[in-house]
Image (cartoon, rainbow, N blue to C red):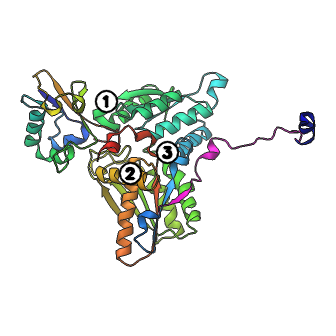
Amino acid sequence: MDIHIPTPLRAYTGSKQTVNVTGATVGQVLQQLTDSYPELRQHLYTPEGKLRSFVNIYLNDDDIRYLPGKESTPIEESDELTIIPSIAGGRYF
Amino acid sequence: MNAKHIDEGNFPMIATARSLGVTLLDRIGNTPLLSLERLTAHLPGVQILGKVEWANPGGSIKDRAAAAIVLDAEKRGLLKFHQAEGGSGGRALLDATSGNTGIAYAMLGAALGFPVTLCVPSNVSPERKNILAAHGATVIWTDPADGSDGAIRTARALAAAEPDHYLYADQYGNEQNWKAHYRTTANEIWKQTEGQVTHFIAGLGTSGTFMGTTRRLRELNPKIKCISMQPDSPFNGFEGLKHMATAIVPPIYDAKLADANIFMETERAYVMAKELGRRDGLLVGVSAAGAVAASLQVAEQEARAGREAVIVTILCDSADKYLSERFWREG
């Protein structure tokens, strides 16, 4: 599946706008993403491993925090994951 | 009880239609300087003072720059006021914004009679969307993944395609932005602290507040330390602030002006916002809370060094437009 990377985080994905990963659940693909691009981890997660408060991750149109299975939600190859800050600050490349 | 007697005898005749009250423009600036006493109670000789910028009619410090930009454009014949009354023919004001500047433009457009078109990332808070709609601004929503940069590209393209329809205000490059603070914010701080200000601390977004206030304060007293605050990461929770190392630098920003810079974690600002709400009765926005956290850091440094200090910072807006964020309910 494809994960869409927001502009400010592309500095940590070699400028890639989308990253293709495989996995059975939301949690697994996010794990693969941060394993492939370790610099991303601190921007998405607290040192305790919790998603940072202002980071929203959408599975298609749904915020994963509000899905019943949260990060254990199963995914299909055709699904898309998008990372969006909860606010719209700054001015990015 | 003789009502007739009261009507005729106790009320003066209104002989002339003299204007009473103040105008919306009069209410921009001259904000209170609030003492944050509890924060420095353990630091003798050190004070932190915050400019209460949510007292501006549009609810944020951005009223100052927006008013300066709009009045300058009208003076130079680039923007026509009272367009609704006089029919068509004028251009609409156009800019990219992630929130408060857009609210200020929308408010001024409604009050002074010119159309406003804003390019705004679609992930701004619902509160902001509702305010822009209530003032009747036209909003073009841009891709949230592109941040403010996507909004800026859209605004530039629109201005280039339809120059007869739009005046591109360009808050990031407009000199009126920092000049508004040079003329007003800095002089207010100087007067309100009776010239005793030793440190000025403000967050960097367009950088207008920091540039203008610092330039004027340094003229008044070259010894004042001016410290900028910016997010510690390009991906952060500060609406409107910039991580300059990874941002396209605003044309009005001069990196050499600051004596020092403090990098602020979003979570530190969240902790301060909640603390100010629960212990000081102050509901401030995330950027304002970050500025207070940076001020406290400087206050503690000065106290450790055995120096007295009068630290002034900017409380750029209140929490009103951020109350739907989940951090208030966490922890």
Identified at 26% across, 49% down, the residue is B233
The correct choice, above or below, for B161 with respect to B323 in the image is: above
What type is the residue that disc 3 sits on?
Lys
Pair 2/1: label in front: 2
Q: Which mark is residue B273?
A: 2
- Farthest residue to the bottom: give it: B306
Q: Secondary structure at mark 2?
A: helix
The magenta-colored residue range is B11-36
The chain letter for the residue carrying disc 2 is B
Q: Is residue B204 visible?
A: no
Q: Which mark is residue B143?
A: 1
The correct choice, above or below, for B30 with respect to B100 in the image is: below
Q: Is residue B90 left or right of residue B160?
A: right
On the image, the x and y values in percent for residue B202 come to 42, 56
Q: Is residue B231 magenta?
A: no
Quadrant of the drawing holding the N terminus of chain B: top right
Q: Which mark is residue B62?
A: 3
Q: Is residue B76 left or right of residue B317?
A: right
Q: CA distance from mark 2 to mark 1?
A: 28 Å
